[in-house]
Amino acid sequence: MGLLKTIFFILLFYYAFKVIAKFLAPFLLAKVADTMQKKAEQQFGGQQPKSNIREGETIIDKAPKNQSQSKNSVGEYVDFEEID
């Protein structure tokens, strides 16, 4: 009789844990996600660049290189020998 009682309590605790976990899991996951987000904000300073650029506007941040080669240059010449 003791074995059946033990198996019954194990199954009872197992299913009770499953039911409780089903209700508490979303709250625990939300808490963990919030904590991770706060840590990431602290680590990276939580600063986003503030700018007055409107949405859809294109900004190019690099200056064009000076063209030191002639405009007619197609590429670099490579001398090669034919092998028979």
Image (cartoon, grey):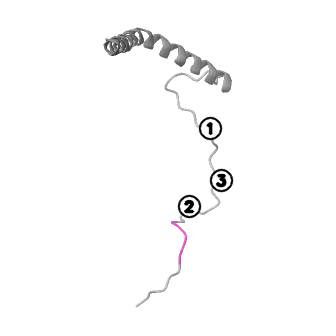
Q: Secondary structure at mark 3?
A: loop
Q: Which residues are magenta?
A: 74-78
Q: Which residue is mark 2?
A: 71
Q: Secondary structure at mark 2?
A: loop
Badge 3 crowding class, 10 Å Cα cut-off, few under 14, some 14 to 19, many 20 or more, is few
- Give the amino acid at mark 2: Lys
- Give the amino acid at mark 3: Asn
In percent of width and height, residue 52 lies at 61, 21
Badge 1 crowding class, 10 Å Cα cut-off, few under 14, some 14 to 19, many 20 or more, is few
Quadrant in which the C terminus is drawn: bottom left
Given residues 66 and 7, the one toward you in this image is: 7
Look at the numbered discs 3 and 1 and tell me whether their residues touch, using CB distance below 8 Å: no
Question: Is residue 4 found left or right of 61 in the rendered image?
Answer: left
Quadrant in which the N terminus is drawn: top left
Residue beneath the point at 53% across and 67% down: 75
- CA separation in Å, label 2 and label 3: 12 Å
Q: Which residue is mark 3?
A: 66
Q: Main secondary structure of the magenta part?
A: loop
- CA separation in Å, label 3 and label 1: 16 Å
Q: Is residue 48 above or below residue 8?
A: below
Q: Which residue is mark 1?
A: 61
In percent of width and height, residue 4 lies at 31, 13
